[in-house]
Image (spheres, grey):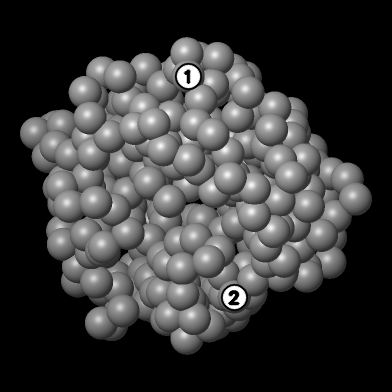
Amino acid sequence: MRIGVTGAAGFIGSHLSERLLAAGHEVRGIDAFTRFYPRGRKEANVAALRAAPGFELLEQNLLYGPPAGSLAGLDAVCHLAGRPGVRTGSAATYEAGNVGTTAAVVEGAARAGVRRVVLASSSSVYGPAGGRVAEDADLAPLSHYGRSKCRAERRASELAGRLGVELVVLRYFTVYGPRQRPDMAFARFVASALEGERMPLLGDGGQVRDFTYVEDVAEATELAVTRGTDRATYNVSGGAPVTLAHAFGVLGELLGTAPKLDPRPADERDPRSTAADLTRARTDLGWEPRTALAEGLARQAEHVAAAGSLGA
């Protein structure tokens, strides 16, 4: 198949592109090379991809209109590009970066004759929950980011139904691993530990997260292209929720050092706990998370050590 990946130079997008190529697909990556990464980080993410047979990379900002020409000849598009992070922007910037780009991709796919769009959404759409949430749970996002992902899902569904495009939605839960964005918790922990700096910790560390290794996310996304049911939504998580304090403890042991934590008040935009019911993904996609937290964190720590610098 010929598959497009928006956000191909980013954290998850670069791993997904590698997986699709390894499976024998042709990949057209689209990325705007935005400022959410240090200079050169995204270029490093796709350095090996640029030389891979079957891969092409287009630099394009999806905010500037439906990319019909960029999607021509593709069988499917995995839309991972968007405005990331819970605390990095206003409602308007999230609206443009997540809802606007999603509409552009679905409209562009319809114009280009692309059969299927796989939309990367987030566990942030759920808000507070007392246990494992299934995909049909009520949505109650706490942040501008979560609300924008809700609206992106709804807008994509409306457009896909009207324009005749198949749509599969994936809700990712707290993704980690090599090439993680530098603003994310594990990346900040590693940087603070290796540089001997204090790390701000929002809350008491008792927050529970269903951490998901990035290569497991890439596998679920690949399977959604070929096995996902049209108009279905799937949770994608590691399946073994733990506290943030526990995860930091594991990572500190792997690094042989840990930063001093600087406790701060919890952010009301962050739910106290996230945990996914994976029944639908297991049944429809035949997908199961493969990577235990300690194994995935070891790979992330090894990647930083092998890179030789935090900016690599």
Question: Relative to 205, does residue 242 appear above or below in the rendering?
Answer: above
- x 28%, y 34%: residue: 310
Q: Quadrant of the N terminus?
A: top left
Quarter of the figure that contains the C terminus = top left
Residue at position x 26%, y 18% in the image: 306
Q: Seen from this angle, which residue lies furthest right?
A: 130
Looking at the image, is 7 positioned above or below residue 25?
below
Q: Residue at x 39, y 47 (%)?
A: 181
Between 153 and 1, which is closer to the camera in this rendering?
153
Query: Does 225 sit left or right of 245 as displayed?
Result: left
Q: Position of residue 246 (x, y in %)?
A: 70, 27
Q: In terms of secondary structure, where does tag 1 sit?
A: loop
CA gap between label 2 and label 1 equals 35 Å
Res 20 quadrant in image: top left
Instruction: Using the image, tell me which numbered label, if any, was put on residue 113.
Output: none
Give the percent coordinates (x, y) of residue 137: 84, 60
Q: Is residue 60 visible?
A: yes
Q: Amino acid at mark 1?
A: Thr
Image position, residue 168 (x, y; %): 57, 57
> According to the image, label 2 marks what residue?
144
* Residue 175 can be seen, yes or no: no
**Which residue is label 1 attached to?**
257
